[in-house]
Amino acid sequence: MKIENTKAQMRKGVLEFCILSVLKDDDAYVAEILGTLKDAKLLVVEGTIYPLLTRLKNAGLLNYRWEESTSGPPRKYYGLTETGKLFLKELNITWSELHNAVTIVTSQKTTKK
């Protein structure tokens, strides 16, 4: 088994949560979302993020608006819907519980029976 495959699956598992978290306080366009993820060392390419944003929008968690740009074509800004805010709140609770459980399990001393 290759470690890179497992690491990629772990990142994919939290990507939705991370994108919603990026948008929790303010709307952002794709380059801003990607920049925030990159700064956190969570490398994502455009080919991955666009289908995910579409899926989140179709699920009613995100909306978008077009805004003119002074440095090029109009930009599509994504933001959380009220449903998205509630969904993110639940994900935060689940993440906290999961993080605590994984920390307990991974820091336990192993015992032989």
Image (spheres, rainbow, N blue to C red):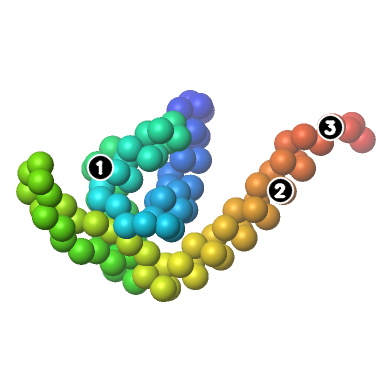
Give above or below for 23 relative to 40: below
9 or 48: nearer the eye? 48
Q: Amino acid at mark 2?
A: Asn
The spot of residue 1 in percent (x, y) is 51, 28
Tag on residue 100?
Answer: 2
Secondary-structure class at tag 3: loop
Farthest residue, direction right? 113
User: Quick one: label 3 or label 1, which is nearer the N terminus?
Assistant: 1
Q: Are marks 1 and 2 in contact (CB under 8 Å)?
A: no
Farthest residue, direction front? 70
Q: CA distance from mark 2 to mark 3?
A: 18 Å
Tag on residue 110?
Answer: 3
User: Quick one: label 2 or label 3, which is nearer the N terminus?
Assistant: 2
Secondary-structure class at tag 1: helix
Q: Which residue is mark 1?
A: 31
Give above or below for 93 relative to 107: below
Q: Quadrant of the C terminus?
A: top right
Tag on residue 61?
Answer: none
16 or 21: nearer the eye? 21
Within 10 Å of disc 1 (Cα), the crowding (few <14, some 14-19, many 20+) is few
Q: Are marks 2 and 3 in contact (CB under 8 Å)?
A: no
Mark 2 or 3: in front is 2
Mark 1 or 2: in front is 1
